[in-house]
Image (cartoon, grey):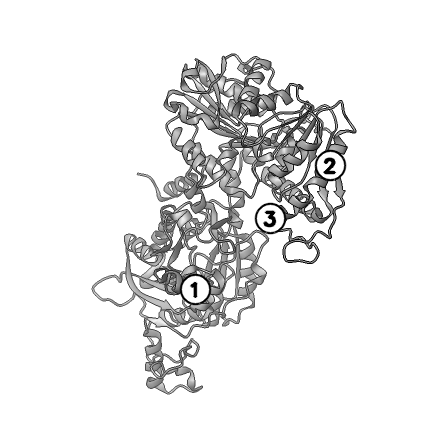
Amino acid sequence: MQSVVDEYQEYLAGKLVSAPASGFEVAESELNSRLMPWQRRIVAWACKRGKAALLPDTGTGKTFMQLEWAHRVCLFTGGDVLILAPLAVANQTAREAAKFQIGTPVTVCRTMADVRPGINVTNYEMLEHFDTAHFAGVVLDESSILKSYSGTTKKALVAAFALTPYKLACTATPAPNDHMEIGNHAQFLDVMSSSEMLSRWFLNDTMKAGGYRLKAHAVKDFWRWVATWAVTLSKPSDIGFSDEGYDLPPLEILQHVVEVDQSIATEGMLFRSPDLSATGLHKEMRLTAPARAAKVAEIIALRPDEQWLVWCNTDYEADELAARIDGLTEVRGSHSRAHKEAAMLGFSEGAVRVFSSKPVLCGFGMNWQNCRNVIFVGLSYSYEQFYQALRRCWRYGQTRAVTAHVVCAETEGPVLATIERKRKDHENMKAEMIEAMRGQTMEQLGVGPKLKTDFERDIRTGNGWEIRLGDSVELLREVPDGQIDLSVFSPPFANLYIYSDSVRDMGNTANDAEFFRAFGFIAKELYRATKSGRLAVIHCKDLPTYRGRDGASGLKDFPGDIVRLFEAHGWDFHSRVTIWKCPVTERERTNNNGLLHKSVTRDSSQIRQGMADYLIVMRKTPNGDSNLSEVPIARPEGFTRYEGESDPRKNSFHPSPFARTEFDGKRDSIAIWRRYAEPVWWDINQTDVLNVKTSRTENEERHICPLQMGVIRRAIELWSLPGELVFSPFGGIGSEGVGALEMGRKALLFELKREYFQIATRNLDAAEVQETLFDFGGNDE
């Protein structure tokens, strides 16, 4: 029979989410000898995974690696592989296969009728003409096409290859903040659905409607997970190999500011004062297109014998360029597929001297190291398009210095500044992403040490209190049977908040089932360690659901789930308290549609009530026939103090026992009892919490529902006696312990996070306590 200890360790191991391998082994020595050592390591790893993503920067040999992977899938399965690529990249891939002498035939296809045994390459636009069930493997070249969360292309690709046994997705390193692109890759590769990824590691971004942001403490665990199924790098040293031969050539970016006649007024203005929003920029660039195109022609004339790659954003810019540059070959969206491919390949082969197009059409996938001169006739606010367009020429394998000319009108200067800021932000974030993945990636590739999942242990004691650093489940096992008089705590709210990246953090869970399995270990051990007839007081709330992540906007009955969990471990449902919360404050914090008055005029079916807090009170069944506790909480004199504030409604139905400073025996005790016994506690001061400013760490989510000291004191006053032991398995910054000491009780707290442990220690040490020594054994002298 499996022990509780083994069961918990098995649970922790299961939380270390990783993509299961479904591939085959291939020795690195068997792979194409033209591959660099680090490329062979990646290809061997991708074969073993079966379904993987290669996310290296441009120029690191992505095409060669995907071809070798496809070749190995063909050999292993005896079946065919389909490579999907952007327009004109299919022919480029076939040429690369011949160059590197891939051992499997490579055929460029238009329809299923063209398919031949081996590797078949086609354009994304032709997907509908293929029977995807025929192929043993698929490669998505420039898989950033999966970017859109709900895009039709993404849905079509996921559906078309749902049953394909071997999958490889390849693109340049995605933007670190474009998490949906990563989630869509995971879904395509059958690693995890996009919605499950959002549920596990992301929060609904209340500052961006419909958006999500990575939980601060989930960052490390999220990138660790990505590294189990994807390899990303900017250079070989990112995964532990030498960078020799992989130095980018020098890059010079020259800005050319073109003077324009600013007396030409914009609509409604006497003189031109351009609005450089996206719409305003478009209007301004139409006015300045002739001047910018003339400057481009002037620059090209300086090197008449060299190739030039000219990027524009609009057809009117393309018209101006065509009118001024002799021999210009261009690609527009309206051109035929045949013309587009011929023009792009002609530029690759040197037959075309000056080539022009838009980054959105030709800025992805093509290798144009043959050209070292790039011109941007104008910029949009998209840094991704600028970066990808530039990297067609400035990439590993380019042997000459690259010069990029950016031509802007003097009224468009702020756009270049914005692109430069985005460039710096992107590079910093990409470096952080690669660094976050480095350890796990190197472990996956077998070039780094095994990652550790141990946790710290520590202990601090004071006058009437003790706090222990560690895993609450394991620490609870050390508490003797029947030792705890009362437990008061606020658990992690499933995966709504997350406080650390530890696998032992109960908030660091994928879904409700995983959370409640962990919480069940607490409920079971707490039942054993609690005195017969005594109580556990659990602070909680309903949890929100979101359409993008959960399929519908609404609420989950988290308090009810807690009741059912504790009942399953022997506890009795004792009572529930509703704690009044201000809906206006919630509306100001969340901007939720259900709390906005404007929803009344649009659709009042969206309107909901504010979200209250709850205390769920569970009781350990008393021993014997009596319903009394093992140690009854007897108060012969009744209540002699009142813990609370005045009623915010201030009406006669809730007279405040706080009105007099002197208590009047039984009459006041009854008044206090009436207030405590109300199912709704209206008189809790919502701002009465420990100072949490000192508890913030750099990468921490704010707990927006802290447990107020008034709630803690009242629970302790109701359900324990002076001198008894109050326990919290989630000590945090020490709120429950401070409340216990202030009420003349002893405190025992467990806390997993070192920063909180240290702050709680200071808070407990500073609390006003009675002169009693803490005796964990319970023998109070």
Q: Earlier in the sequence, mark 1 or mark 3?
A: 3
Distance Cα–Cα, label 1 vs label 3: 28 Å
Asked whether 187 or 770 is in front, the reply is: 187
Relative to 201, is 765 on the left or the right? right
State the residue position of label 2.
Answer: 294
Q: Which residue is mark 3?
A: 278
- Residue 603 coordinates in the image, percent (x, y): 37, 60
* Horizontal and vertical percent position of residue 577: 34, 67
Looking at the rendered structure, the secondary structure element under dot 2 is helix
Badge 1 or badge 2: first in the primary sequence: 2
How packed is label 2: few (under 14 Cα within 10 Å), some, or many (20 or more)? some
- Going from N to C along the chain, the mark reached first, 2 or 3, is 3
CB within 8 Å, label 1 to label 3 = no
Q: Is residue 498 left or right of residue 614?
A: right
Query: How many marks are shown on the rendered structure?
Result: 3
User: Element type at marker 1?
Assistant: helix
- The percent coordinates of residue 616 (x first, y second) are 34, 62
Tell me which residue sits at (54%, 57%) in the image: 756
Q: Depth-wise, is mark 2 or mark 3 nearer the camera?
A: 2
Amino acid identity at mark 3: Ala
Q: Which residue is mark 1?
A: 598
Q: Residues within 10 Å of mark 3 (few under 14, many from 20)?
A: few
Callout 1–callout 2 Cβ contact below 8 Å: no
Tell me which amino acid carries mark 2: Ala
User: In whole angstroms, how far apart are the C-alphas of marks 1 and 2?
Assistant: 52 Å
Q: Is residue 693 above or below residue 391?
A: below
Check disc 1 and give the amino acid type.
Lys
* Mark 2 and mark 3: Cα distance apart in space: 24 Å
Secondary structure beneath label 3:
helix
